[in-house]
Amino acid sequence: MIADTLIAGGRIFRGLAGGFTDAVALKDGKVLALGDAALAAAGSQTRHIDLEGRIAIPAFNEAHMHLLPYGLGLTQVNLRAEEVRTLDEVLRRISTAAQSAPKGAWVIGRGYDHGELDVGRHPTAAELDAAAPNNPVYIVRTCGHMGVANNAALKLAGVGHNTPDPEGGVIERRGGILTGLFLERAQRLIKDAMPEPDQARMVDAIEAACAHLASLGFASATDMNVGMTAGMAEVTAYETAKASGRLPLRMWQVLAGNPEGIAQDAWAAGLRPMQGDDSLRWGAVKVFADGSAGGLTAAFFEPYLASAGGGTGVFTFPDDKIHALLKQYHEQGWQLDIHAIGDAAIEQVLLGMEAADSPAYPFAARRHRIEHCGFVTRDQRRRMKARGILPVPQAVFMYEFGDLYVKNLGHERSDHAYPMKTWLGEGHHPAASSDCPVSTVDPFINLFTMVTRKTNKGTVMGPEEALTVAEAVHCYTWCGAYTQFAEDRRGTLEPGMQADVTVLSADIFAIEPEAILTTQTDITLRDGHPLFDRHGEMATAVAAQ
């Protein structure tokens, strides 16, 4: 059998078990052969990709992100800490956006980190009023668990100083006056007042987000909370994108399962677990148990440091309510993808999962997941392993927020967060991911963090949890596929597997860890076809035949 494509001239990482080979042949969307057999499969019509010392790996799998919101956010005001370190810059960017927006149109910003701002606090409603006097404004903190509205937005949302805090949420007041800050489920009060994007804009956003991920080496991704921006219209947008050839990545879809989400509407409309195909699969439901450690809303047994404000965080629901939700979605057949960061929230979720595991509805082979699972105890890991409950962590949180964790929780507790090495050693399958747009979706920053345990300020956190490069790539490829019941099809480059391949600009297994940060993706293949080709190598290889 003659190969369609031959990749050689450098190392190919087959996977953690298979190690390396020097050639891979692709045929009809699958891996045909490796090594000498791959070289022998090349014919006169075979396209040749010369690695020239670079490396090819299985394409990355983004196991936990918010793809549609990320795509929509590409047109929102960027307030991420890489670019925005002062309150004045936050307000300048909001003012600039407001000046070019129609009067009365919403101005949305995403990604500020109050811990990184020069003032060390959240902006206020009054400050946003001054920056955009003619527009409602809402800016969302990088974690996505809180945000600040100006007074025009408060008015449109019908929120006043007497509005009660909703269950699982907080409307901040100081001296009885609204500051504009909304935490956790209270954000729905503001978001429900915003106009929903139309179908055309959502399909554009899906396609744009997929294209950007492909340029970073991803062939598979996830949308973790479908329905929280535009309800059931998001399901239609994805189906439309697929039908029109505008969904280049393989997508694992997770419905929003909180009461304000769409899981019940989707069920009533006939959407069922595992519906779809390998391009677009509806597999799971997400429920929130707590918030974020950086925002002081992740739920812990022990309080945050007094110097950070104390308290033990915010539970999204009381025990009986979240346990009922977990039981309901488990019995409907969905994979449970439950957000829990603090150890108290993880415990609440585990107790609910354990209660839902029954002879009539057993957990065996269900691969339920605890998303983030950042501050997990030894006993909790043991119980997760016993029932096959998977951690889906974001090591990149350590890079972007690690120093804030130290400020909020102290070094000892923070050093043990996101224990990647321990999970692998205990036989878990931790699927590396970014939670984008909470953190950068750049896989090379995530790989660097897994290998070094360094923050963006250079602080080393829990070095005993550092992975080898091979282990880190394994977590970013095979483990992600495993969480999506797809490890028999992708995540390694063995004969018969899908030809989802990423060619990197440098051999990340042979360079210093800091050089991983500047590595790029040169080619991304899905089924052997290019999703991204930085230098036009695929076309050149064909033309040279």
Image (cartoon, grey):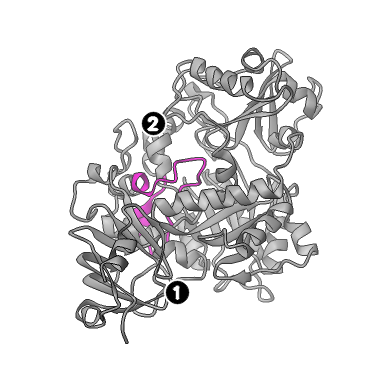
Give the vertical position of 185 relative to 254 (above or below): above
Could you give the CA–CA distance between mark 2 and mark 1, rounded to whole angstroms?
A: 39 Å
| Front-most of residues 201 and 81 | 201
Helix, strand, or loop for circle 1?
A: loop
Q: Which mark is residue 489?
A: 1
Give the vertical position of 31 relative to 201 (above or below): below
Q: Which residue is mark 2?
A: 403
The amino acid type of the residue labelled 1 equals Arg
| Front-most of residues 19 and 243 | 243
Q: Which residue is drawn at the image coordinates 76% and 63% (left, top)? A: 267
* Quadrant where the image shows the C terminus: bottom left
Q: Is residue 440 magenta?
A: yes
> Which quadrant holds residue 301?
top right
Can you give x and y, in whole percent of width and height, for residue 418 in the image?
41, 48
Give the vertical position of 394 relative to 300 (above or below): below
* Quadrant where the image shows the N terminus: bottom left
Label located before the other in sequence (2 or 1): 2
Can you give x and y, in whole percent of width and height, for residue 384 in the image?
50, 61
Q: Which residue is drawn at the image coordinates 52% and 66% (left, top)? A: 484
Residue 432 falls left or right of residue 69: left
